[in-house]
Image (cartoon, helix red, strand yellow):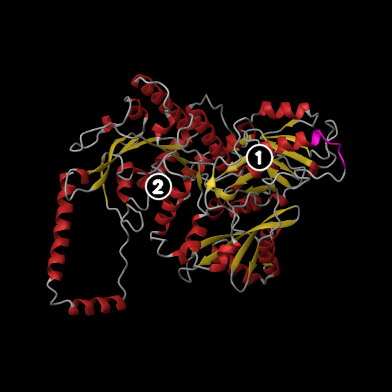
């Protein structure tokens, strides 16, 4: 939900840059073997964990001896190379750590030597946050309130089944005057972030909608409730939200924690804190998106130690089960380990198939809010698919794909953009205009307002521009999926990855087929949707594009799950229109057209919602109508509008 324009807000929330470069800090020359070799050469402690390589702070390390204190440990992510040094309270990328280790090895180890002193890109692992502390200290524990006051506060949110003793254990507080709840993330006894829950009641007898606000606004990277888990505990229940975690603990007494931002992401910064657990039970409920995410996170956490509660109408999310009167302990014992990734039996698929039959709308994917016709044709946006998009040069392919992906991103679909034609600043400007639905060059006073809210979207950009090798692009995409939990990748466009090598057309076609095969494999293996923009062949302007018009061999359209064509009839007709034509839909086979109407001010292809006229506007319109009663041009304008509407209907019938 957007907040009102505030000049001071722009100076407070600057934790994230306007464009998040997904490959910033990415290093292709990192692997588990390379990290091992560097640590061995420097005679540092080496222990292979579930997701991280565990060593000791470079400053304290002495020839591979074990750490004397758990706060002295150095965690290095086995996949991305991201490191976190608990002793120095620093984190960063593998090249920074490697440079620091080499620098340290050339100098005498002195007690006053400061690690990472000359590396500007290294940032604090745990940030000192005064805003979160101030907000949290302003609130009071639920147990300190009178029983009836605490009950009414929880009843507004629908959380009256959660005991105040459990809320107090997890550090949950409230503001009795403003009526909001404060859910803290506590690390080493310090509050580093607070999630503020505000209830907007719809009526006195019903529970209203709940709005979440994070302080600080930057995405938290630590899990909720970890401070409540004793150091000797080796099994944990991981939930998608705080209320589910507290429900599990209340009913089963099993230590339970929750993800920082729901099941939309599992930050790599949170992995070191989960390294000590030998068993992690993922309980995200029976939602299809949650189930898909649980399987992905199990791989990220190391599937060998992960158990999952499979989707079923009889095994819903923890808090839902609590409200339905189900025994959470009976559901929890049904958790099963992840099966071998290459072998599966029907017994493992049975509950998943039943869940898909019960939730057909969720199986269809995330729905577009700006393109309702696409929902009727494609039914939704699904993981693991490959979409090929083509259209004439200059018809607006990039502009449409920008809004197409922005629509999904605004609904929580983590998105990675790879634009090889235009730079990220220009692409970001276009997206921000589409996000604001207004021309910001004419309303600069609203820039901070919309830019601050755009920053909260899970949108990332690759910094490649011009011709680039397939390997580097795939490596960057894999890195982004692991680190940022990307669910949608847009590559604009394929021709920039084909290079100029080879003079024969057959060489180019073979190279394109290899690229298509790589993207198809990536989409399937990573369970990530890939949208690929491909220029069409040179066709006659008088003819519409077809599936066969896609440049290259037939492999692109054969491998694709969806084929979308941007048709531009303006080239063949004075009053021609643009429209999207779905020529392939592997999900359910439905094909069709979606007419487009471009608004130059907002750079949007989606129709604006008509505002309900206020009484003041009706009065003004009536006065203007009477003033223009004798205007000779007014009847002509009305007639043109009617002709436009009739012609649009005729075009739709003709198409």
Q: Give the magenta range.
A: 104-110
Q: Is residue 296 left or right of residue 33?
A: left
Rendered position, 457 above or below 196:
above
Q: Main secondary structure of the magenta part?
A: loop
> Nearer the N terminus, badge 1 or badge 2?
1
Q: Is 109 inside the magenta-drawn segment? A: yes
Residue 18: x and y, percent? 53, 53
The structure residue drawn at horizontal position 22% and vertical position 77%, both measured from the top left corner, is 624
- Mark 2 secondary-structure assignment: helix
Q: Nearer the viewer, residue 373 or 183?
A: 373
Q: Which residue is mark 1?
A: 93
Residue 215: x and y, percent? 62, 60
Q: Nearer the viewer, residue 45 or 103?
A: 103
Q: Is 566 inside the magenta-drawn segment? A: no
Is residue 18 visible in the rendered image? The answer is yes
Rendered position, 192 above or below 8:
above
Q: Which residue is mark 2?
A: 402
Residue 376: x and y, percent? 30, 46
């Amino acid at each position: 939900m957007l907040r009102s324009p505030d000049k001071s807000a722009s100076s407070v929330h600057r934790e994230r840059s306007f464009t998040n470069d997904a490959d910033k800090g990415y290093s292709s020359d990192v692997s588990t073997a390379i990290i091992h070799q560097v640590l061995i050469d420097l005679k540092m402690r080496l222990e292979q964990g579930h997701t991280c390589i565990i060593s000791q702070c470079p400053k304290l390390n002495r020839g591979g001896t074990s750490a004397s204190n758990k706060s002295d440990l150095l965690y290095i992510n086995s996949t991305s190379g991201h490191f976190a040094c608990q002793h120095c309270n620093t984190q960063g990328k593998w090249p920074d750590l490697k440079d620091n280790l080499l620098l340290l090895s050339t100098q005498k180890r002195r007690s006053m030597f400061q690690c990472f002193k000359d590396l500007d890109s290294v940032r604090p692992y745990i940030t000192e946050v005064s805003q979160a502390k101030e907000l949290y200290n302003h609130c009071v524990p639920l147990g300190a309130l009178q029983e009836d006051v605490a009950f009414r506060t929880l009843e507004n949110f629908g959380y009256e089944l959660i005991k105040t003793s459990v809320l107090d254990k997890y550090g949950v507080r409230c503001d009795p005057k403003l009526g909001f709840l404060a859910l803290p993330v506590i690390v080493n006894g310090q509050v580093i972030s607070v999630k503020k829950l505000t209830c907007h009641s719809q009526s006195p007898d019903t529970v209203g909608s709940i709005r979440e606000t994070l302080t600080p606004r930057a995405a938290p990277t630590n899990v909720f409730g970890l401070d409540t888990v004793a150091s000797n505990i080796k099994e944990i229940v991981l939930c998608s939200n705080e209320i589910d975690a507290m429900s599990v603990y209340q009913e089963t007494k099993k230590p339970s924690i929750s993800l920082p931002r729901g099941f939309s992401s599992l930050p790599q910064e949170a992995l070191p804190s989960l390294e000590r657990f030998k068993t992690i039970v993922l309980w995200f409920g029976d939602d299809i998106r949650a189930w898909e995410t649980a399987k992905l996170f199990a791989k990220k956490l190391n599937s060998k130690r992960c158990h999952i509660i499979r989707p079923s109408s009889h095994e819903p999310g923890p808090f839902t089960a609590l409200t339905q009167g189900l025994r959470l302990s009976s559901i929890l014992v049904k958790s099963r380990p992840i099966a071998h990734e290459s072998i599966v039996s029907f017994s493992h698929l049975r509950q998943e198939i039943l869940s898909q039959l019960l939730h057909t709308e969720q199986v269809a994917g995330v729905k577009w809010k700006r393109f309702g016709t696409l929902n009727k044709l494609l039914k939704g946006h699904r993981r693991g698919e490959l979409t090929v998009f083509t259209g004439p040069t200059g018809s607006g392919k990039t502009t449409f794909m920008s809004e197409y992906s922005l629509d999904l991103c605004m609904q929580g679909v983590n998105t990675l953009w790879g634009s090889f034609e235009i730079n990220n600043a220009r692409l970001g400007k276009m997206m921000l205009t589409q996000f604001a639905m207004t021309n910001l060059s004419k309303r600069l006073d609203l820039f901070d307002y919309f830019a601050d809210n755009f920053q909260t979207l899970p949108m990332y950009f690759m910094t490649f521009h011009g011709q680039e090798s397939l390997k580097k692009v795939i490596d960057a995409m894999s890195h982004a999926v692991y680190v940022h939990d990307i669910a949608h990748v847009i590559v604009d466009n394929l021709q920039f990855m084909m290079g100029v090598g080879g003079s024969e057309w057959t060489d180019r076609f073979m190279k394109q087929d290899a690229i298509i095969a790589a993207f198809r494999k990536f989409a399937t293996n990573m369970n990530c949707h890939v949208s690929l923009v491909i220029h069409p062949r040179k066709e006659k302007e008088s003819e519409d594009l077809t599936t066969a018009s896609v440049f290259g061999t037939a492999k692109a359209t054969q491998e694709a799950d969806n084929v979308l064509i941007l048709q531009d009839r303006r080239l063949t007709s004075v009053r021609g229109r643009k429209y999207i034509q779905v020529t392939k839909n592997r999900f359910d086979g439905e094909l069709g057209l979606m007419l487009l109407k471009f608004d130059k001010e907002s750079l949007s292809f989606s129709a604006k919602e008509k505002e309900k006229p206020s009484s003041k506007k009706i009065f003004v319109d009536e006065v203007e109508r009477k003033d223009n009663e004798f205007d000779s041009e007014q009847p002509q304008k009305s007639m043109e509008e009617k002709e436009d509407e009739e012609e649009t209907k005729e075009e739709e019938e003709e198409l």
